[in-house]
Image (spheres, coloured by chain):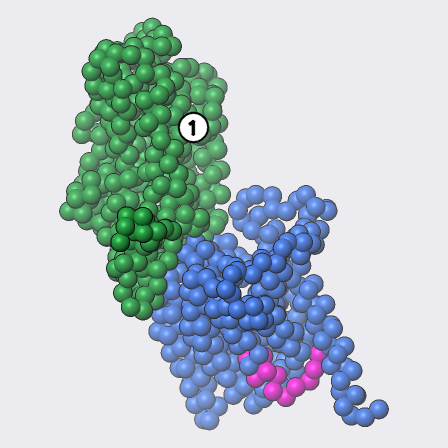
Amino acid sequence: MNVFLQNLIPLIIALIGAMIWLAFNALILVYCERKFAGHIQRRPGPFEVGPHGILQPLIDGVKLMGKQLVRPDNADPVLYWLAPILSMLPVLLLYMPIPYGPVLTGMEVNLGLLLILAFSSFNGLAVILAGWASNNKWGVLGAARAVSQTVAYEIPLLLTVLTISFMTGTLNLTEITALQAGHIGHWFIWKQPLAFLVFLIAMFGETNRAPFDLAEAESELTAGFHTEYSSMGFGLFFMAEYGYMVVMCSLCTVLFLGGFHGPIPGVEGWWWMLAKTYGLLFVMIWARWTFPRVRFDQLLNINWKWLLPLATFNLLATALIIKL
Amino acid sequence: MSAYQNLEQMKGDFYTQKFEAGKQDGTLIINLGPQHPSTHGVLRVVVEVDGEYIVRAEPVLGYLHRMHEKMGETQTWGGYIPNMGRVDYGHAMAWNWAYVGAVEKLMGIEVPERAEYLRVIMTEFNRLTSHLLWWGAYILDLGAFTPILYAFEDREMILDILQRPTASRLTYSNFRVGGVQMDMDDKCIELIKAFIPHFRERLPMYRDLVTDNLILRRRIEGVGIMDQDMCRRYGCTGPVVRGAGIPYDLRKDEPYSVYDRFDFDIPTQDSACSAGRYHVRLDEMEQSMRIIEQALEQLDSAEGGHIIKKAPKPAMKPPVGEAYFAVEGGRGKIGVYVVSDGTKVPYRVKLRAPGFSNLSAFAEAATGTILADAIAILGSLDLIIPEIDR
């Protein structure tokens, strides 16, 4: 077997694994979100389909797929259908370099961090295409907002990630995780609390989650960029959003919370990674059902006037300390 | 060009064409509504935006026109009462009161004292439900879904109370010319006494949970200034005018019924912005509870104890003449003007809806703000579309 095939087969297996993981996460998160919202809002949440409503996400999926795919008049057919696919596909690649457990990494890449940052920008592109190709003014407004939001929030995100790679001297996520082995004191959150905070806030902006869900603000823009999408067109955007949420929370876990390492020495495993990632995801869900939505200029102000200077200061301080 | 060709040109949407005539270069004309989630029904607002900034805005009515005034001229005097609940589903009681008040004035009917107290209690409860519905919906407009469910929880408790004397939960029509249809039973009084301390605990929780939230404050403070001069020019009333610092409230200024017997305040705010209107409504809920408590205390000492003056005949015929009666509704001054020609059907019914005047000020207040602010302003006016588009 030649080298190409030797590399290809594990990659395909990893991709299939990522697909299953993505679909599984979307199902679980939809359920969690609704259940969690139910508790916050003092209502039962899904309770009808299956015990405690656990089959609800499956039924939702079936319902969503059963709906008619509609394209508005004069919408660009190619771009219109390309957008949801483009939104969904890169998410699969994002899962590849994340070390979920000691032996559970899709693909060992030296530039894993860079790969995630590069491919996560695709979502912005997909959103712009969707909004533009929809032939809908609300869609265009949503797309315009999405551009400025994605561009804005990617910069502090990148700067905080850079601090970690300055400290560790690597862009390989497995190595970054390995450096946090041992006990809870080794996690980078203690060395980089400011970076963690900035990352956490930028994560909300980057994944378009409330209170930063300005691109799809339903009360202002009816639904923003996906106003015209029905059935699985919308479903793919929806899955991609959950996909990005999981990726960002996994990345945050790997960078700041010790990845798959437990809080005491010798305890490690994929379940730690999962617990921490889901802990962060619950923070995102909690924020969504608690806070009102910020205004768009306020959203950009938070980024340009607070997050960016803070992240830059943090990066410079880190560089200075390392140099000294 | 013939008139026919002119008509051909005007085909399509008249309002959009008229609005587009003044369009600037590089702007976008968009429709907020009639199906937009934040227009609370079927209001349409044509907006010209330059990026996110609003250059012009124009509310367009007519998508919910149900001819309430015309219907008043086709039904009997008594038969028209249920229509009033449909005009404003938020504060149906006040509309009922304004109409029966006008007819009573026309016929010179005195209402029994107990009925007056019952009217006050029910109308104030209905004001509470109206403000609760607004509060939840307003926060929903600003992007938070949870508070409306909390508001509905309390609103349901009030609806349980109101259901007993009125037998309905939304579009009430239990006021009759000369009194009210049914009295409050012991269970109803029991529910009221349980509700008031409960709600006194809930109001501070609303403040902690929502009012003091930094995101919400940044969204509403200083947004949508409608100052005293502007309110006067457009004839705004209710929380809008009180939010601008004018303590105008019919319950104090032109006391009707037994309102002069209660000790309560008219909350005002000087900021004239959306936050001012927001705080006025929250404070009004406290005042409504004070009124209810006092009315409940005085209810048993009311003279006579009967709730309706000799029930008028189904086909009553008021004497020839005209009458106008106004009450303070949840959204402002509700006025009903009736003209009788001595038959069993009104000759003319004219409704003065506060929401219509309040909405008129929107175009001016929204100009120059950004799209998200327009939603915050629209929500702060507490619009009920059937009332505006009657």
| Residue at position x 57%, y 48% in the image | A38
Residue B244: horizontal and vertical position, in percent?
21, 46
Tell whether A279 sits left or right of B367: right
Is residue A128 visible in the rendered image? The answer is yes
Chain identifier, colour blue: A
* Residue wearing tag 1: B171
Instruction: Decide: is B274 above or below A208.
Output: above
Tell whether B71 sits left or right of A170: left
In this view, the residue farthest toward the right is A1
Residues shaded magenta: A106-117
Instruction: Decide: is A113 above or below A278.
Output: below
| Residue at position x 43%, y 28% in the image | B171
Tell whether A184 sits left or right of B8: right
In this view, the residue farthest toward the front is B2
Question: Could you say which is closer to the camera, residue A292 or residue B45?
Answer: B45
Considering the numbered disc 1 on the image, is that residue within a helix, a strand or a loop?
loop
Q: Determine if the magenta segment contains residue B359.
A: no
- Chain B colour? green
Residue A111: horizontal and vertical position, in percent?
60, 87
Residue B112: horizontal and vertical position, in percent?
30, 11
Residue B350 is drawn in which quadrant? Answer: top left
Give the quarter of the figure containing the N terminus of chain B: bottom left
Q: Determine if the magenta segment contains residue A110.
A: yes
